[in-house]
Image (cartoon, helix red, strand yellow):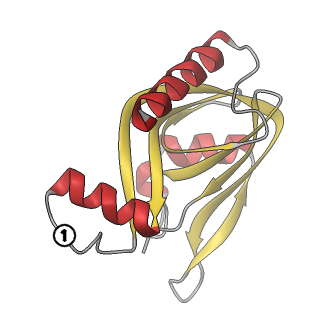
C-alpha cells in the first residue's frame, strides 16, 4: 500500500511538472539522476535515497542479500522520469575535486550546469549525476549534488 501511494505521488508530480502547473512537491525535495538540462528545465530519472532500516530492508528485498547495502544507503529506481521547471533564480551546487582530489562543493549557474552535462569529458572524477531538487511554488529553486562514497 505504501509503495502504491509513493508510485501514485511520483506519477502525479511528473504530470504536474510536465504540464507546468504547481507541483504537489512545493517546498519539498526530490532525489534523482540528472539526465538532461537547459536553462529552464531539468529532466531527471526519479530515484529514492534510502538510509538506515529503510535502506537495509529495500536492499534485502531488491537483491535477495542480507546484511544491508555496502555504503549504508540504497538508491531505489522508481522507473519514471520527470521534466522539472527551473526557477529563473535557481541555485546549483555540483561536486568538484579540490586540489587534493577531495570532493568539494562547486557553485554553478544554469549555463555552467548545461555545459557540464553537455561535455562529460570535462567533468572531474568527483562529479556525480545524483542531485536533490528543492521546490518552491512548483519550481526548482535549488539543485544540490549528493556525495556518494
Q: Position of residue 92 (x, y in %)?
A: 72, 51
Query: Residue 106 versus residue 18: which sits nearer the camera?
Result: 18
List the single residue furthest toward the front: 1
Q: Which residue is mark 1?
A: 66
Considering only vertical position in the picture, is 55 above or below 134?
Answer: below
Residue 108, by quadrant, is: bottom right
Nearer to us in this view, 135 or 12? 12
Identify which residue is drawn at 56% across, 51% down: 131
Residue under the point 57% across and 14% down: 15
Categorize mark 1 by other alpha carbons within 10 Å: few (<14), some (14-19), many (20+). Answer: few
- The picture places residue 56, in percent across and down from the top left corner, at 33, 66
Residue at 59%, 58% in the rendered image: 145
Task: From the top left corner, tell me how far across and down residue 22 is, in percent.
Answer: 76, 19
Judge from the rendering whether residue 58 lies leftward or rightward of residue 107; answer left or right. Answer: left
Task: Please tell me whether residue 59 is drawn above or below residue 102 in the rendered image.
Answer: above
Q: Quadrant of the N terminus?
A: top left
**In the rendered image, which quarter contains the C terminus?**
bottom left
Amino acid at each position: 500500500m505504501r509503495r502504491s501511494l509513493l508510485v501514485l505521488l511520483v506519477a502525479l508530480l511528473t504530470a504536474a511538472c510536465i504540464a507546468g502547473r504547481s507541483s504537489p512537491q512545493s517546498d519539498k525535495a526530490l532525489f534523482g539522476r540528472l539526465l538532461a538540462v537547459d536553462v529552464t528545465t531539468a529532466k531527471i530519472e526519479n530515484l529514492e535515497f534510502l538510509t538506515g532500516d529503510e535502506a537495509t530492508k529495500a536492499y534485502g528485498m531488491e537483491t535477495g542479500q542480507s546484511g544491508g547495502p555496502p555504503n549504508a544507503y540504497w538508491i531505489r529506481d522508481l522507473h519514471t522520469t520527470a521534466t522539472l521547471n527551473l526557477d529563473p533564480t535557481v541555485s546549483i551546487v555540483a561536486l568538484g575535486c579540490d586540489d587534493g582530489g577531495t570532493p568539494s562543493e562547486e557553485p554553478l549557474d544554469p549555463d555552467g550546469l548545461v555545459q557540464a552535462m553537455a561535455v562529460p569529458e570535462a567533468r572531474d572524477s568527483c562529479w556525480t549525476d545524483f542531485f536533490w531538487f528543492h521546490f518552491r511554488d512548483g519550481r526548482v529553486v535549488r539543485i544540490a549534488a549528493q556525495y556518494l562514497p
